[in-house]
Image (spheres, rainbow, N blue to C red):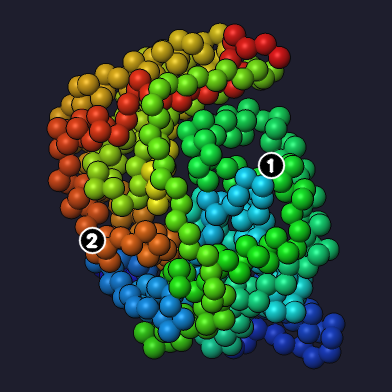
Amino acid sequence: MADNFQGAQEYKMQKYLKAVISKSPRPSGERGRERGQTQRSAWLLQAMFLAAVLSLLALPAQAGVKIQSWQAKSGAKVLFVENRDLPMLDVAVHVDAGSRRDSPERAGRADLVAGMLQLGAGGLNEEIIAKRLADVGAQMGPSFDRDRAGYSLRTLSSKREREQALDILAKVLQTPDFPDAVLQREKTRALAALREAETKPAAIADKAFYKALYGDHPYGLPSDGEIATVSKLTRDDLLRFYQNHYGASRAVVSIIGDVSRAEAEAIAEQMTARLPEHESCEELPKVEALDKPQEQRIAHPATQTHITIGAPGIARSDPDYFTLYVGNYILGGGGFDSRILNEIRQKRGLAYSAYSYFIPLQQPGPFQLGMQTKKQDADVALKVAQETLNKYIQEGPSAAELKQAKNNIILGFPLRIDNNRKLLEYLGVIGFYNLPLSYLDDFPRQIEKVTAQAIQAAFKRHVHPDKMVTVMVGAPEATP
């Protein structure tokens, strides 16, 4: 019955989308065309919203996703999943242009480049770009972190809509204009955000934490820059960064949706054929482990203390990844199932939320434990967190904790790949970090293999409580 219902719904949705495409109004005259574009855009956005909802049913909620991969003529790596369930197409392109490619003198440049690509490209200003995307109901936006920068696009797969949307994405990626007037506006906006962040305890804690963890390593640079560095950025700075780091040879193209392999090959070439040829591929310095504990207590008038504890953790390719994934779920990643929340909130009422997580990057990203608590409770909460971490590393998880964690992770995994958007992000991660194409199939099996002994051993290898950074913003002993 479920399969029959799903098939009927897919058939109805495809008919609806085709009707929207073919019958939406196109009045003549300049004003009429504008009204028609607005109405057509509204219909298409409604259709895409319904399609996205339906995709929860349309895509099988389990692994077994067939990922095809090849190298484009441009040199880019391509990952493709064909899915004919809906007349939709999702495309993403990522490059090695995250904030780790910034320099101390130009911190914030990588973020500004990524954001400005869509604000003028191929001779089209930002209003025309937005209008052309809206005309076909497409959605496009940037993504950015310490390792990667990129853009993703969602569009209907019908010829007119797909071609117009892909043409915009290709222009944005390959022929950015970086207009001076727009740059000045975006710098003003970025500087205002940086000034505001200087007053926010969470932002202060995050910046101090990364600086303490990584020192002069590029991972320690603030991804959104500093007031002093952003204010000095010029159009030439942005162009130079783009030429150096947006090359095709290190690009990853992810494609999923209602197109054939041949069409996917053409899309990958269209997105990357005109990317810069002479990119900079210098190796980053190695992330060094901490050799001693550090503690920073930063004054702030907030009523709560923001506590962050951590150290460099693991790289995305580390063989202990799955073991630590399960282990951290038990420690602080599983919400109300986690030890840290149980000790901090349930038993003592010291904080509303307490957590831990690994952020695996190309080089070791941070292991981080954190919470917010009343100033008068800050030292007690810190001590409880440290004792909980120490005990967990020394004793490891119980059999009951391990069983519950593995069940929750494995049973919840289908929800992490139940639509094209989620799968698209996985394709980008698999391609960028050179993970096996069988990663999605392997995930539940790898989780099931994890043992309590393996978790304890992996935590002892990677997490050293006597060599960790502690940042407390709004600490009780600090004075303004």
Residue at image position (40%, 73%) is 77
Residue 212, above or below 226: above
Mark-to-mark CA distance, 1 and 2: 42 Å
State which tag comes first along the sequence, 1 or 2. 1
Which quarter of the rendering shows the C terminus? top right
Residue 7, position in %: x, y? Answer: 34, 75
Image vertical order of residue 468 relative to residue 461, above or below: above
* Residue ID for mark 2: 441
Q: Nearer the viewer, residue 26 or 370?
A: 370
As helix, strand or loop, the secondary structure at mark 2 comes to helix
Q: In the drawing, does residue 186 fall left or right of residue 98?
A: right
- Up-down relation of residue 48 to residue 330 (above or below): below
Residue 393 in sight here: yes
Q: Where is mark 1, residue-wise?
A: 226
Proximity of marks 1 and 2: CB atoms separated by less than 8 Å: no
Tell which of 89 and 476 is nearer to you. Answer: 476
The quadrant in which residue 309 appears is top left
